[in-house]
Image (spheres, coloured by chain):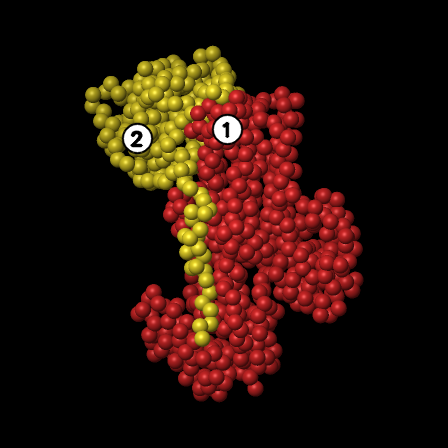
Chain colours: A yellow, B red
């Protein structure tokens, strides 16, 4: 038995929504009996980008905005791992937004949890792209608009049982190879943008709405758009499909890199460059 | 009357899409069959179709990496070709001019040049209904100028179009029309004005630096590639896309260079050998990630196929103006290794070495190429695949991890390298971060820890100094005057040194293959000379500045700089050195 690092204590302020996200994630990993050594949690930069220190899994701290490409590379290189990307709304929707669209498009089979608090907490209160009253963007609608998207959900830290359930569903979706599981969590920042009261008043739970069919993309898009028009914000499993990911990828971590076993085929490649010599 | 030729230079120029490059390929095949070593280059605008394009070919008895000073045979498909390239034709050279678009423009050729004006394009359309067949028409004429047997010419055309049988006959027909034209102009078969030598040749491959490097990486066990298309590095992405999957690997075309390099980092994190390849603009975007690989200690190999900067610069032109960025770029101080290839053989060998070194130092290694090395082709001996070794560095297997007792991802060791466990291994859980961290990977700003960690990382490159690839030496080592350069001018420098030696000017030559850290070999070479000409394709003498930064005097080093996007020719470089020696 070899000892390794001891999980850190969270750095977050008392009352921060991120505690709820971490709790839901730990419970979901436990519910699904996923070993910590087979779990790789990659986090971005920001208050949320410290969650990987607290879990006891393999953890990676990505560059600001680059958690998705890093997680994509890690998952492609070892799809046997349970890969979880995590970060904030600044990391994911401002500096890193370009990658989100392509993650939806490529549909890599890992989970991405965005802790949305509408603010840059670590740098003390600047607006993020989702801040109320600043022409906010909705990444759920973005996901729905990309035709390859297979899983979009939104949780709220005030609804911990549902958040745990959505986290389990997201992990199951990705682990089953169905593709990119996108889970945004409304996770208020009590210090710089306390949105508990706002979101309490705005949220609508589609999981308890008998008319919402999460397998119907266009209906989901309409419903989310209509709710926005009414000043409401939907939570729950917004949309998922069961189809396989578009890209079936190899597992290079298991590949034999030789070189002895491959010399003959390397020679075949080399032969294509051979110059025809004088033949008389 | 027939003049024997052992160093043959040809150029074909016209509008992009004229097929200039096809003529060069076929002519190259003809030369290769006679045992010539080949060097081919293309000089293209960055447009896909249209824009002026030139294909260049040199055939020699000894291997050369670069074009000669003058062109023996110039196939010009339009007036612009004559205007742009006419001055390069040798005084006793030949111009085969397509007069379909008008007569030969005056005033661009020396008096002794023989001109054959033929409306190839018009004749091809008239007789074969397709202008593109003018290329085989031209080839027929040229092969007669070079006294090549008609059967040989037919053989290379058949081989070239073997995959498109419907194109064989019309191309042969065009070639025969070329022969007929030659017959009418006193160039019967076997009686042309130039006779190419014929020698017995060893096995050779004709390969670009990009393909050679890509094959080297594949052989070195690279199984993850992420890239974004960019001239002149795209062929590495193409090669990996074609081949890596057969070896259980993955090649990804990412949405941008930021994604590409971070995907490579993510894959490397799992223990898979990972690569990205780009050019200067992409290298600029990747600087943050390279710095991160240095801090977080992740093995990463990055190819820089340099092109002319700054900014978008001249995408299809060669330059070596990223040297300073590769050595000093990225925020903060971190160890990195920069290797530089001078030809395809170097590119292959250094790709293997770079991959192993990145595993050994658990950090970033650059392989520096330039557009000329990347995209020009030359014949080289087939690469030796039997001596390749895979060095895993200090990776732990499960047994080693189990008995270690306590695993710290960033444990401080004598040589700075920390034993490394991969995600998926029980009891090897770790925190990997670019933030300053303690031995467990926990973020730390504690001053003592900071100093220990900076020093630990710096020790990693010191530990591999003796294993960094040595340079190539040429010329007279005993001379007190040296010449030093990397990349595209490597072959030219050798030729220049031979030229000057025949004039009684002896030079000692060094082509370093490691440029950072500056190896002892380079330090000793410069220190042992009274003068060293440092030849670079950039405006500011970046390599000389690097050498100055490690203690060499600018009084010893004389920069010879070129930044017009065109490679030196041997005489041109010799003239610059003669001027320097005269001063």
Answer yes or no: is residue B38 visible: yes
Q: Which residue is drawn at 45% across and 34% down?
A: B270
- Say whether residue B582 is left or right of residue B128: right
- Relative height, residue A189 to residue B347 (above, below): above
Question: Which labelled disc corresponds to residue A176?
Answer: 2
Q: Residue at x 58, y 23 (%)?
A: B438
- Give SS at disc 1: helix
Seen from the viewer's position, the closer of residues B245 and B120 is: B245
Seen from the viewer's position, the closer of residues A270 and B150 is: A270
- Residue at the limit of the structure toward the top, as seen here: A14
Within 10 Å of disc 2 (Cα), the crowding (few <14, some 14-19, many 20+) is few
Q: Which residue is drawn at 50% across and 59% down?
A: B382
Seen from the viewer's position, the closer of residues A72 and A254 is: A254
- Residue at the limit of the structure toward the left, as seen here: A211
Distance in Å between CA atoms under marks 1 and 2: 32 Å
Residue B428 picture location, percent across and down: 48, 25
- Give SS at disc 2: loop
Within 10 Å of disc 1 (Cα), the crowding (few <14, some 14-19, many 20+) is few
Residue A124 picture location, percent across and down: 53, 21
Question: Which labelled disc corresponds to residue B493?
Answer: none
Nearer the observer, disc 1 or disc 2? Answer: 1
- Say whether residue B87 is left or right of residue B192: right
Residue A148 picture location, percent across and down: 31, 37
Residue B283 lies in quadrant: top right
- Residue contact at pointers 1 and 2, CB within 8 angstroms: no
- Relative height, residue B275 to residue B186 (above, below): above
Counting every numbered tag in the picture gives 2
Q: Which residue is drawn at 65% across and 43% down?
A: B466
Q: Mark 1 points at which residue?
A: B400
């Amino acid at each position: 038995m070899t000892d390794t690092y001891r999980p850190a204590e969270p750095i977050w302020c008392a009352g921060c929504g991120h505690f709820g996200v971490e709790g839901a994630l730990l419970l979901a990993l436990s519910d699904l009996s996923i070993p910590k050594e087979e779990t790789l949690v990659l986090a971005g930069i920001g208050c949320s980008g410290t969650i990987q220190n607290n879990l006891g899994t393999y953890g990676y701290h990505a560059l600001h905005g680059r958690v998705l490409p890093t997680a994509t590379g890690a998952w492609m290189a070892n799809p046997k791992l349970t890969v979880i990307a995590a970060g904030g709304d600044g990391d994911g929707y401002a500096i890193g937004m370009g990658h989100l669209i392509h993650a939806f498009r490529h549909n890599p089979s890992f989970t991405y949890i965005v802790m949305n608090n509408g603010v840059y907490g670590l740098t003390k209160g600047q607006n993020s792209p989702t801040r109320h009253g600043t022409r906010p963007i909705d990444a759920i609608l973005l996901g729905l608009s990309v035709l390859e998207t297979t899983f979009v959900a939104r949780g709220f830290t005030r609804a911990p049982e549902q958040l745990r359930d959505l986290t389990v569903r997201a992990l199951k979706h990705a682990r089953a190879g169905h593709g990119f599981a996108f889970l945004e969590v409304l996770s208020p920042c009590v210090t710089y943008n306390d949105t508990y009261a706002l979101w309490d008043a705005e949220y609508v739970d589609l999981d308890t709405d008998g008319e919402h069919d999460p397998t119907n993309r266009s209906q989901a898009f309409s419903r989310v758009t209509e709710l926005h028009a009414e000043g409401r914000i939907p939570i729950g499993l917004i949309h998922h499909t069961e189809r396989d990911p578009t890209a079936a990828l190899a597992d290079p971590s298991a590949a034999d890199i030789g070189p002895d076993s491959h010399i003959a085929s390397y020679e075949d490649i080399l032969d294509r460059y051979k110059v025809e010599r004088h033949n008389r | 009357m027939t003049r024997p030729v052992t160093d043959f230079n040809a150029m074909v120029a016209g509008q992009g899409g004229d097929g200039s490059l096809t003529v060069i390929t076929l002519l190259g095949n003809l030369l290769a069959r006679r045992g010539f070593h080949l060097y081919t280059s293309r000089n293209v605008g960055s447009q896909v179709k249209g824009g002026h394009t030139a294909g260049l070919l040199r055939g020699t008895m000894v291997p050369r990496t670069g074009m000669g000073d003058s062109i023996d045979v110039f196939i010009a498909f339009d007036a612009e070709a004559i205007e742009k390239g006419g001055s390069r034709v040798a005084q006793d050279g030949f111009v085969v001019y397509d007069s379909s678009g008008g007569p030969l423009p005056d005033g661009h050729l020396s008096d002794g040049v023989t001109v054959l004006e033929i409306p190839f394009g018009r004749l091809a359309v008239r007789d074969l209904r397709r202008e593109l067949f003018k290329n085989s028409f031209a080839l027929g004429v040229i092969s007669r100028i070079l006294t090549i047997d008609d059967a040989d010419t037919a053989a290379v055309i058949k081989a070239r179009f073997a995959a498109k049988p419907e194109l064989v006959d019309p191309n042969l027909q065009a070639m025969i029309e070329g022969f007929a034209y030659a017959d009418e102009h006193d160039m019967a078969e076997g009686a042309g004005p130039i006779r190419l030598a014929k020698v017995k040749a060893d096995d050779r491959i004709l390969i670009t630096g990009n393909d050679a490097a890509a094959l080297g990486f594949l052989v070195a066990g690279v199984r993850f590639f992420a890239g974004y298309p960019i001239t002149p590095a795209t062929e590495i992405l193409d090669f990996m896309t074609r081949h890596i999957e057969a070896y259980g690997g993955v090649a990804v075309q990412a949405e941008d260079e930021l994604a590409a390099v971070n995907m490579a980092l993510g894959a490397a994190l799992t223990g898979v050998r990972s690569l990205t390849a780009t050019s200067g603009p992409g290298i600029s975007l990747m600087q943050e990630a390279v710095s991160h690989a240095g801090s977080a200690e992740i093995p990463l190999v990055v190819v820089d196929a340099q092109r002319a900067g700054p900014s978008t610069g001249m995408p299809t032109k060669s330059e070596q103006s990223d040297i300073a960025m590769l050595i000093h770029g990225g925020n903060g101080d971190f160890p990195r290794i920069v290797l530089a290839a001078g030809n395809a053989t170097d590119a292959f060998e250094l790709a293997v070495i770079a991959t192993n070194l990145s595993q050994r130092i658990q950090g970033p290694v650059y392989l520096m190429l330039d557009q000329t090395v990347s995209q020009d082709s030359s014949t080289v001996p087939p690469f030796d695949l039997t001596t390749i070794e895979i060095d895993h560095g200090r990776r732990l297997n499960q047994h080693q991890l189990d008995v270690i007792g306590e695993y710290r991802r960033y444990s401080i060791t004598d040589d700075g390298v920390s034993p490394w466990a991969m995600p998926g291994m029980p009891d090897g859980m770790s925190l990997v971060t670019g933030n300053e961290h303690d031995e467990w990977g926990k973020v730390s700003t504690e001053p003592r820890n900071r100093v220990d960690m900076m020093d630990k990382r710096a020790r990693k490159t010191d530990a591999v100094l003796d294993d960094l690839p040595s340079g190539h030496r040429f010329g007279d080592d005993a001379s007190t005057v040296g010449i030093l350069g990397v990349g595209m001018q490597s072959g030219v420098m050798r030729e220049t040194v031979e030229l000057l030696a025949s004039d009684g000017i002896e030079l000692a030559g060094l082509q370093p293959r490691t440029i950072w850290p500056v190896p002892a070999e380079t330090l000793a070479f410069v220190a042992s000379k009274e003068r060293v000409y440092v030849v670079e394709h950039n405006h500011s003498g970046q390599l000389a500045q690097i050498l100055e930064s490690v203690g060499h005097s600018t009084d010893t080093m004389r920069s010879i700089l070129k930044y017009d996007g065109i490679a030196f020719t041997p005489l041109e470089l010799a003239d610059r050195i003669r001027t320097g020696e005269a001063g």
